[in-house]
Amino acid sequence: MGQRVVDVQRRRLKPRDRTRALWPGLALPGVAWLLAFFVVPFYGVLAVAFGGLDPIFGNAVPAWNPLEWDTTVFGDVLDRVVNAELREVYLRTFVYVGVALFLCFLIGYPVAYYVSRFGGRRRGLLLGLILAPFWINYLMRMLAWINLLQEDGYVNDILTGLHVTSSPVNWLEGRAVTVVFGLVYGYIPFFVLPLFAALDRIDRSVIEASRDLGMGPLRTFLRVTLPLSKQGMLAAAVITALPMMGDYYTADLLSGSPRTSMIGNQIEFFLFEGSQKNAGASLVVILSILLMAAMAYYLVQTDRATRELHRS
Amino acid sequence: MTFHPRERRIAGGIDRRAFLRQSAFTAAAVAAGPSLLAACAGDDAAGGGGQAVPLSRPDNPVTLPTFDDIPMIADGLEPESGPLKIFNYAEYIAPQTLRGFRRQYGVDVDVTTFTSMDEAIARLSGGQAPFDLFFPTTDVIAKAALGRLLQPLNASYLGNSGNVWTQLQDPFYDVGAQYTRPYSLFTTGIGYRVDRVTQTPDEYDNPYDILWDPAYSGDLYLLEDDREVLGMAMLRAGEVDVNTEDAALVDAALADIQALDDAVNPRIGVEAYTILPEGRATIHQAWSGDVVNAQYYLPEGESIENVGFWYPAEGGGMIGSDQMSVLVGAANPVLAHLFIDYLLDVDNAHTNFEWLGYQPPQTSIEPASVVADGLVPAHLDTTVIRPEDFDNGYQLLQLSLAGERLWDNAWSTFSAGA
């Protein structure tokens, strides 16, 4: 009898225990989402990368069983990435994205800082204005820029009017600077918003304490605000860099020159036009591995910051 | 993979294919594009019983295989009640042609569009396209037939077949015209701004050299098509087998277009019909039909007289044609046959051409009459295609998968800007 009571009591969870069991359950939708829209599709990409092609249509024949994976095409693509012409396009992509991120930081940080610190009652309006370009399709905005950047466009009118340039510049003739500009323009809202959120979370009393202890505005910014916004900058950089790395249409629209093509253009070619879908999938896998390294750095940094927060 | 003339830019500067694709997918979705999804839909969509795709050539005519379980329709059947379902490039049939067919047969006609031949074949081979009539390019006909996508045509419904050029009535890529009837024609040449060039292509020792002329650096476009660009480099070098699978020849063509890249930093696109009239480039490798269509995209105050087109006067350039086929499993095969016949009718073909800009291979359409009727400006008579152009021109045809890989890798190297 006594043992039965104990068993019943064991089975009957206390309300607190039930609540504790609920929290992991809340992660289920997210886990299901990740499984359905990341893990399974990514496995599909792997199955195509290591699969074959049907002999008539050249369609990909995915190898779902890892034991049947054929690494020949992946090896060839990897060799072209490491030793041959695809290395250049990978490097070019990283340089473009790196420069674009730097410019996003130079432009986006002051904007996010201003909105979070001085936005006051207008911050909603300011955030709305930052998001306003999203109301218009990305392609429409880029097409507008094509008109603005033409030799007889408004950009050249302004530059020549201000005597910045002596004659109209052909911005669309296949220039790296135009592609980088397009990346910055297209993705900078992704950079500003997480940064704004991070800056907005900084406790004002910490900043006031710094000022009370005699540090000027610049030193307070450099010694307090900037370090405290590091996680926000990292998050902004990751959120911005990931889509930039896969971008192919910005280079396509604003340049069209092979000299400014990005890795996304190669992926697009192999997947949509070429007869080697498995080569395109291999390029996706290689790019994903490189991006996962960046993501891993971000996750390690975030984890470290969280642990430091708990210690303090 | 060849890139078809109808894979054109929409007004405003972006091709339809790119617009649809780019609108549909974010950058992240590149990783799992429709090709992959299509691939994942089934393990093997190919049919053909293990046969290799036959590689037809003018000197190697091919009779495409037929299958007992895919018979042609019987003679004398009544047309179905429709609607007739057409699978085609966007804006590749004149609206008045569709209206005329609707009136004549009292049926609805639904047109579903695709943006590239690769996409079309992927959809059809994945069993996702319940259509009646399909407009394939010449280079995919063999794989479409072998892959059991097409049904043999019944000539008893196609009385107007005799209206087309003789050599296309029994073509080498489909001996006996079992699966196809020709729809439209195009040549690939060099479009240029008459008011800006210092020499027309004709005035160069080798007209193709204008594409390599550093005077047009940053002011020149090549077609976004590996076969067309590498093929033109081959023709410039005097190599006329534009369907070669000889790695040395492909590598030589690659080296030539890389030299072109060094000399002129070309851009890649398929917008000749707007770029040239708007003056956004001086030189554009272009399809004949796009240059004809340039007259409809002129900015205010601009004249079509400023747009020129070079194609070898004596023939011997790149040339091609599109076809019409009835699909396996068509719910309205009789209507599909009747529609093909409707398009082969002299008057209907003429009406369609007026709107389309791409010439049909009709014996009644004489080069002189095309200009006299005002369909093509007199100075652009180089866009008009003559039957003999097919005798001495070079068509881009089906390659083996290994050959496609060879060309694709060359294009990948070029487009990587390495």
Image: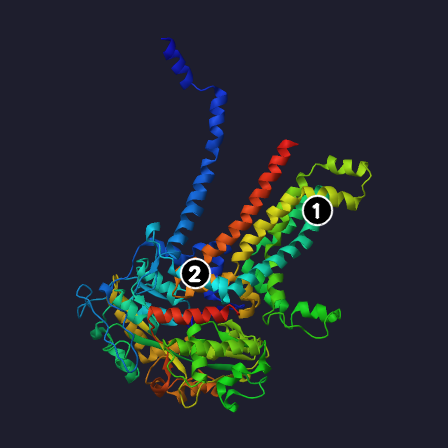
Residue displayed at 50% across by 21% down: A16
Task: Return the x and y of residue B406 as percentages of the image width and height.
Answer: 39, 71
Instruction: Decide: is B363 above or below A58.
Output: below
Are the residues under badges 1 and 2 in a single subunit?
yes
Residue A275: name its quadrant: bottom left
Task: Return the x and y of residue B147 as percentages of the image width and height.
Answer: 27, 65
Instruction: Decide: is A96 above or below B210.
Output: above
Instruction: Residue under label 1, please give it.
Output: A113
Instruction: Decide: is B333 above or below A200.
Output: below
How dense is the environment of label 1, judged by Cα within 10 Å: few (below 14), some, or many (20 and up)? many
Which of disc 2 and disc 1 is earlier in sequence?
Answer: 1
> Which mark, residue B399?
none
Residue B9 appears left or right of A55: right
Q: Amino acid at mark 1?
A: Tyr
Residue A177 appears left or right of B9: right
Task: Return the x and y of residue A2 as percentages of the image width and height.
Answer: 38, 9
Q: Nearer the viewer, mark 1 or mark 2?
A: 2
Residue displayed at 62% across by 32% down: A310
Residue B232: name its quadrant: bottom left
Task: Return the x and y of residue A124 as percentages of the image width and height.
Answer: 66, 44
Instruction: Residue under label 2, please give it.
Output: A280
Q: Residue furthest right?
A: A214
Q: Residue furthest top?
A: A1
Residue A201 appears left or right of B387: right
Q: Chain under label 1?
A: A
Q: Amino acid at mark 2?
A: Gly
Q: Nearer the viewer, residue B240 or A66?
A: A66
Q: Chain under label 2?
A: A
Q: CA distance from mark 1 to mark 2?
A: 41 Å
Q: Secondary structure at mark 2?
A: helix
